[in-house]
Amino acid sequence: MKTLETLGRIGESPEGMQRLAFTPADVEGRKYVTTLMTRAGLEVRVDPAGNIIGRVEGKEPGLSAIALGSHTDTVPSGGKYDGALGVLGAIECVQSLRDQSITTRRPIEVLDFTNEEGTRFRRWLYGSRAMAGVLESDDLTAVDDEGVTIGRRLEDVGGDISRIQEARRQKGDLCAYLELHIEQGPVLHQAGIPIGVVTAITGRIALEVSIIGFANHAGTTPMTNRRDALLTASRIIQAVNSIATHEEICRVGTVGMAKVSPNAENVIPGRVDLSVEFRDVELDRLHEAVHRLNGICQQLVLDKDFEIKVSELGVTKSAPMSPRLREIIEKASLGLGLNTTSLPSGAGHDAQSMAEITDVGMIFVPSVDGISHSPKEYSDPEACANGANVLLNSLLAIDGEGD
Ligand code: GLV
Ligand code: MN
Ligand code: MN
């Protein structure tokens, strides 16, 4: 709790955590994580994708490592637990083993992934996708809202875009990846169950929709002659919501960002750029949602003299958790007297990238009132400690398995 509290002060503001990837606060948070890793006896390096990797060797040579991790960047006005619990909980496990002079058979690696949230560049799971070797060419040339390239930003966290391929880990390099995380939804809190065993992580399609109308005088342009991009954007926002609610095409749909130009009270908006995301475990449903959205946009273009561009920014496949690790997490929880339930994750996680190269398992603990990506995000000390204990005992169980 002490380390969570300390990290939670880095990048804190009255509106919540502002530890966005690549900001000075993120760099400071990463420095703190590095200090904790070193104190726990981990040897620390930063890979070319900026991922912080702490490693402690095991006592049997030649065995692949067990990896534990998450991220320490936050969304704007975010909370103190999303990501942080998984990284600090993992370090605590290693510290705990050290305090008790326990050396595992296998090496242990603690991973703090770069830009999980994707707030910068709108490219999420950046570090874990680099590690899994699933970055796409656009990921390497991305430029952020301030006109700064990803290569330049990576330098700020010790990465190197020219060597990013070297961040890739091969299948068999790690024998498992475990991620402890707050649930970020209401299921565990409402049911009063301390541990969630994740079954699968949702898939997601991220898009940008640009509506180009015509900026004109708000006082003189008759209502009939307007090409108001914001008015059309509002119809698209309604449609995104409806695709997931009334039409039930996919599980959720969200417009989280809107950029209005020129954004002045006496000018009819000439252009609006919207972020749109759809999430579902079934990829087909995501494609169907995009198809429907395209159809609605085409109709809006026909009705009015507008240009609407829909661009796909990225598709993240859903990822099933390993049955073997689910069983291990379940047993570790019951062994600690903690009840469990199995549930899917509606949020995205680095574990879904890591599923490309190793078996992955996720442990959820309750989020009070199911609130996350908000300064009100809270998981109580007992919940956090329960999660870390399950993480530790799961790690030991994996270490005790046959080769
Ligand atoms: C990551 O936090 C997400 O958006 O699910
Ligand atoms: Mn997270
Ligand atoms: Mn998050």
Image (spheres, grey):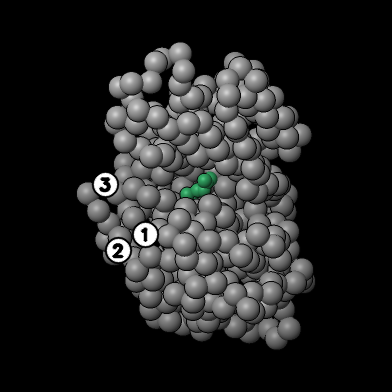
Q: Is residue 36 left or right of residue 279?
A: left
Q: Residue furthest left?
A: 14
Q: Could you tell me residue 360's position as x and y percent?
A: 66, 57
Does the CB distance between marks 1 and 2 fall below 8 Å?
yes
Q: Residues within 10 Å of mark 2 (few under 14, many from 20)?
A: many
Q: Residue at x 45, y 21 (%)?
A: 226
Counting labels gives: 3
- Say what secondary structure mark 1 lies in: loop
* Coordinates of residue 296 in the picture (x, y in percent): 64, 23
Q: Quadrant of the C terminus?
A: bottom right
Three-letter amino acid code of the residue under disc 1: Arg
Residue at x 54% of width, y 72% of height = 151
Which circle marks residue 15 in the picture?
Answer: 3
Q: Residues within 10 Å of mark 1 (few under 14, many from 20)?
A: many
Q: Secondary structure at mark 2?
A: loop
Q: Amino acid at mark 3?
A: Glu
Q: Is residue 146 above or below residue 251?
A: below
Q: Report whether residue 205 is seen.
A: yes
Q: Earlier in the sequence, mark 1 or mark 2?
A: 2
Mark 3 in CB contact with mark 1 (< 8 angstroms) = no
* Amino acid on which the number 2 mark rests in the picture: Ile
Q: Earlier in the sequence, mark 2 or mark 3?
A: 2
Distance from Cα at disc 1 to Cα at disc 2? 7 Å
Q: Is residue 269 above or below residue 385?
A: above
**Residue underneath mark 1:** 19
- Identified at 73% across, 83% down, the residue is 62
In the rendered image, the residue lying farthest to the front is: 220
Q: Quadrant of residue 216?
A: top left
Task: Look at 73% across and 63% down and name the residue there.
Answer: 357
Q: Is mark 3 within 8 Å of ligand 3?
A: no
Q: Secondary structure at mark 3?
A: loop
Q: Which residue is mark 2?
A: 10
